[in-house]
Image (cartoon, rainbow, N blue to C red):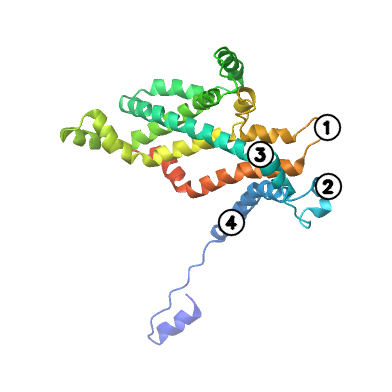
Amino acid sequence: MTVLNKARISTGAPAVPARRRKPISARAYKVFRVVALVVVVLFLIAPLFWMLLASFKTNVDIYDAGKSFLFSPTVENYANVLQRNNYFVFITNSFSVAFVSTALSLVLGVPAAYAMSRFTMHRSALVVLMARVIPGVSLLVPWYYVFSNLKMVGGFEALILSHMFVALPLIVYIMMSYFDSLPLELEESAQVDGLTPIGAFRRITLPLSVAGMATAGILSFIFSWNNFMFALVLSGSKTKTLPVAIFDFVSYASIDWGGLMAAATVVTIPIMIIALFTQKYIVSGMTAGATKG
């Protein structure tokens, strides 16, 4: 008991409760967590920040360590990328392939995931997931052989089908977990009211699974947008996508670092904007299958 409390008790006044001090370990953990978060964020942002700065530099300034932050910015790299190399065509190609492959994968994958979830086809789901686990480089030679015999190499069809091979298993697996988290009683009540199983899926289950479809679609779109290996082998001069077009800045004798960083910025910004405005759907969709009930 403190001296102040003894004096208040002797005079009949109520004692002042002693303040509880937070344990030093709790404060230390809080400081450590803040510092760790700052370090991780800086570690992730530093390459992007360097890429953005380098896109406004000449090749001479990029190699000069004294001009890491203080330099005369130039937009010549972006003019070279967007005007002279006509990167708007490559942007259109990348968006078309990513959008069509994602849309077709959702059309095929969502009903398949629903059927696997409701009929507990977990072994079939593992077989589908194996297609996602198989390294893509092991499929390039068979794909090239098949598509070349079908006269499809260099067209959008080959790119879309190859991207769907990876996007479809991803969508099926994500949507299976999402459908498992939805109560079966909702569909049973709808069928009691006169709906068929397909009608219950279309009117009840499908609207409730928008967040899961958004998550699967966004992840599939990002994969297709960033894919380099499939497009390098299966695309042509008219169907070249952005990741392959960026590779043109790398030659045998030298590398145009300014143009390369400007092109990389053009590729990165759309995905960052999509992830920024759709992060709530990604979080809600990825955690939907964590619990059931």
Secondary element at image label 4: helix
Horizontally, is 213 left or right of 34 in the view? Answer: left
Residue 182 x/y as whole percent: 31, 37
Residue 159 x/y as whole percent: 55, 26
Hey, which residue is sitting farthest bottom in the picture?
A: 11
Residue 132 x/y as whole percent: 51, 25
On the question of residue 290 being in view, the answer is: no
Instruction: Tell me the distance, in whole angstroms, between the alpha carbons under discs 4 and 2.
Output: 38 Å
| Three-letter residue code for mark 1 | Ala
Secondary element at image label 3: loop
Residue ID for mark 2: 60
Residue under the point 63% across and 44% down: 266
Instruction: Tell me the distance, in whole angstroms, between the alpha carbons under discs 2 and 1.
Output: 16 Å
Does label 3 or label 4 sit earlier along the sequence? 4
| Three-letter residue code for mark 4 | Val
> Dot 2 surroundings within 10 Å: few (below 14), some, or many (20 or more)?
few
Instruction: Tell me the distance, in whole angstroms, between the alpha carbons under discs 3 and 2.
Output: 25 Å
State the mark number for residue 34: 4
Residue 18 x/y as whole percent: 46, 73
Does label 4 or label 2 sit earlier along the sequence? 4
Residue ID for mark 3: 86
> Dot 1 surroundings within 10 Å: few (below 14), some, or many (20 or more)?
few
Q: Do the residues labelled 2 and 1 touch (CB within 8 Å)?
A: no
Front position among marks 3 and 2 = 3
Front position among marks 4 and 2 = 2
Residue under the point 40% across and 87% down: 11
Residue ID for mark 1: 253
| Three-letter residue code for mark 3 | Asn
Horizontally, is 260 left or right of 9 in the view? Answer: right
Does label 2 or label 1 sit earlier along the sequence? 2
- 262 or 24: which is nearer to us? 262
Instruction: Tell me the distance, in whole angstroms, between the alpha carbons under discs 3 and 1.
Output: 23 Å
